[in-house]
Amino acid sequence: MGTVFNHNRTYGVELEVNTSYGANTLADAINAEFTARGISAQCQVQSYNHRASSSWKIVSDATVRGWEVVSPILKGLEGKEEIDAVCAALRSLNVTTGVQTGMHVHHDARGLTAKQIGGTFGAYAAFQTLLNYGVSRSRRGREQGGYNTIANWNRITSNGSDNYNRNYTYGITADTTFRGPRADNASAFISSINRKIGMARECSISIGSSLSRHGTIEFRQHQGTTNATKVWTWVLITQSIIERQVQNRVSFPKPVYVEIANGKSVAKGDFIRFKRFIAISPRYNGGDTATTEPYVWAFKQLYKNIKKFARQDGITDTKDIGKNQSNHNYVRP
C-alpha cells in the first residue's frame, strides 16, 4: 500500500530570522501580503510564549539576532498558501538567516500509538545520514560544530532490537493522556523515548517538550530559511515519514551501513531506499497520481538538495552516501 498526502494532519512551522526591523514591521508586512493575496489569516506581535495561537505570531528568540515567526495550526494546501505569503513578506524586507537560525516543523501526533511514534523516530534515524545532506552543513550535528544532535539509530532502536512493543502502546488522546485499560500519563512514554534520544530538546527530531505541550512531533534539523519551497518541502518530507507509519504497518528500517554489515547488497543507494520505504510512487497506490503528487514533488526537491550539499563535501555519487558509515555520524568529507 502506498503512502498518500494527508490533507487532514495538522502542522505548524517556526521560522527564525535575523533582522534589525522591529516585530511590528514584520507583522505589518505579513498582514499586507495576506490582504493582497485574499488570505484571511492574521499576524500579531506577542510576548515570548509557547502557546498555540489562532494567528501567526512574531515573538522574541534569544538564540537569534531578530525574531521567530510562528504559524498557527495549519492544515493541507491552505497552510501552504499562508507559508507562501509569509515567506514572500519576509523576503520583501530582506531579512536574513544564518548558521544560528533554524526552521522547525511540528506535526500532530495525537492518536498515534507509541509504536507509531517510535517507528517515526526509528525511520528518521535510519535515514539520518541521507537527511543530513538534505540540509546545510551547519545542521548536521554537534559532532561537526552544528546546532543539532542527530538521531542515533543504535540508541533509539537499541541496535534494532526495540520495536516499542512494550512501551505504552495505547495511543495518545487530544489531551495527550494515554487511552486504554491503564490510566498512564503520556509523560511516561515521553520520558522513555527522551532517554533514548539523549539531548532530546536539541535533537534533529524531538518530542522533548512538544508532545506534552502541543501533542506534536517536532522536526528541528532544517536550516533557517525564508524560501517557501524549502519550507513546504520539509513539511511534506517530515509528514511523509509519520504517514508511512500510520497508513501502513509500522516498520523499523535499518541504516545502509547496518544492511551492508549484515551482508546485504545495497546498489541503489540510500535515497532510493528512503523513497521506497515511504512508498510514495503512484504504483503503490493503484496509479492514483493526485494523492501522491505532493510527496513525489517534495522528494524531487529533496534530491536536488542532497546532490547539491553532497557535492560540496566531495561526494559525486549519491549512492555512496552512508555506505562508509560505521556509526550514527554522517559520512565525513
Image (spheres, rainbow, N blue to C red):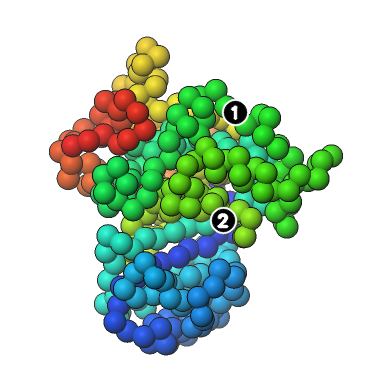
Who is closer to the viewer here, 140 or 4? 140
- The x and y percentages for residue 149 are 38, 46
Residue 322 is labelled as none
- Give the quadrant of residue 78: bottom right
Camera-near label (1 vs 2) is 2
- First of labels 1, 2 by sequence position: 1
* Callout 1 amino acid: Asn
At x 58% / y 37%, what residue is drawn?
118
At x 61% / y 44%, what residue is drawn?
191
At x 35% / y 28%, what residue is drawn?
327
- The x and y percentages for residue 158 are 51, 27
Name the quarter where the C terminus is drawn: top left
- The x and y percentages for residue 64 are 34, 69
- The x and y percentages for residue 256 are 37, 26
- Circle 2 SS class: loop
Residue density around tag 1, few if under 14, some if 14–19, many if 20 or more, within 10 Å: some
> Is residue 36 in view from this perspective?
no
- Residue at the spot of label 2: 209
Residue density around tag 2, few if under 14, some if 14–19, many if 20 or more, within 10 Å: some
At x 49% / y 83%, what residue is drawn?
45
> Is residue 228 in view from this perspective?
yes
Name the quarter where the N terminus is drawn: top right
- Residue at the spot of label 1: 163
